[in-house]
């Protein structure tokens, strides 16, 4: 069920306060109207939070902050992230899902990234996930196997090209799904919580999607939440 505008705005206000190191910037007047439009348009709270995060990341890169950020400054980033989220789930601008929507969410990294740099990032994130222990020791054997395969691909003289490159990309997709499946099977409680969170994120669009489209979108959101919760990198290229 979608949150009422007033509650949605309070959640945004609270999140903005945390991002502003406790400095409260009220979401009232024109700002309230702005955020209420996000709620009316079906922008999930987590999507809005990611848009706010994106603005702050860019803000921090400019140097030491001088003043608290108002929510109005984050609007373009929130709408950009919302647009990316809809496209990733196969949602049109009219908020209906296309029949051929993919269940694979595109990588957040630039689509122009090279395969070698992608492999390097995946290896680093796999190592980090193992060090933190979030994905559990049962995934160690799979991580070892994935790391060995990626290391071998990186070490190929002259790089991976032609048919070998296509085969590697297919293999990366298979390894990605294998790791997700393994981590998702850890406990019924985790799986149920993730599926519920995915359903809540899509609640605003549920009645405007076909059963098949909702199932695909739900699977895509659940995969993304699983990755975020356990620090799983996107192995697919």
Image (cartoon, rainbow, N blue to C red):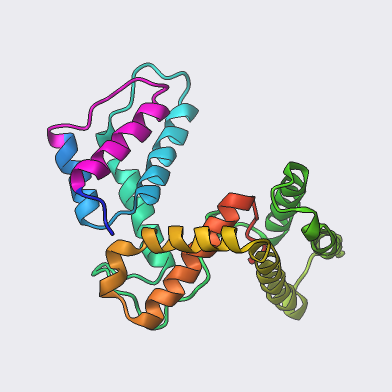
Residue 64 visible here: yes
Residue 27: in magenta span: yes
Residue at the image position 66 percent from the left and 70 percent from the top = 177
Question: Which image quadrant for residue 31?
Answer: top left
Q: In which quadrant is the C terminus drawn?
A: bottom right
Residue 187 or 167: which is nearer the viewer? Answer: 187
Residue stretch in magenta: 5-30
Q: Main secondary structure of the magenta part?
A: helix
In the displayed image of the protein, which residue is found farthest to the left? 29
Residue at the image position 77 percent from the left and 59 percent from the top = 139
Question: Which image quadrant for residue 43?
Answer: bottom left
Judge whether 177 appears above or below 25 on screen: below
In the displayed image of the protein, which residue is found farthest to the top? 66
Residue 174: in magenta span: no
Residue at the image position 19 percent from the left and 54 percent from the top = 40
Question: Which image quadrant for residue 200?
Answer: bottom left
Residue 131, x across and y down, in percent: 77, 43
């Amino acid at each position: 069920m979608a949150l009422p505008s007033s509650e949605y705005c309070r959640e945004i206000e609270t999140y903005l306060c945390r991002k502003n190191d406790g400095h409260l910037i009220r979401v009232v007047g024109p700002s309230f109207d702005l955020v209420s439009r996000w709620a009316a348009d079906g922008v999930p709270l987590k999507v809005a939070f990611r848009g706010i995060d994106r603005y702050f990341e860019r803000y921090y890169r400019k140097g030491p902050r001088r003043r608290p950020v108002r929510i109005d400054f984050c609007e373009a980033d929130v709408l950009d992230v919302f647009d990316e989220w809809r496209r990733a789930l196969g949602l049109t601008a009219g908020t209906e899902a296309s029949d051929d929507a993919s269940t694979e969410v595109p990588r957040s990294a630039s689509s122009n990234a090279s395969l070698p740099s992608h492999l390097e990032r995946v290896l680093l994130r796999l190592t980090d996930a193992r060090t933190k222990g979030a994905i559990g020791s049962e995934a160690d054997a799979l991580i070892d196997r994935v790391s060995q395969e990626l290391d071998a691909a990186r070490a190929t003289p002259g790089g991976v090209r032609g048919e070998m490159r296509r085969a590697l990309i297919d293999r990366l997709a298979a390894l990605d799904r294998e790791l997700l499946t393994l981590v998702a099977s850890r406990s019924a409680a985790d799986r149920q919580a993730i599926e519920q969170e995915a359903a809540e994120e899509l609640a605003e669009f549920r009645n405007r999607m076909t059963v098949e489209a909702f199932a695909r979108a739900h699977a895509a959101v659940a995969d993304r939440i699983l990755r975020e919760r356990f620090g799983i990198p996107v192995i697919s290229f």
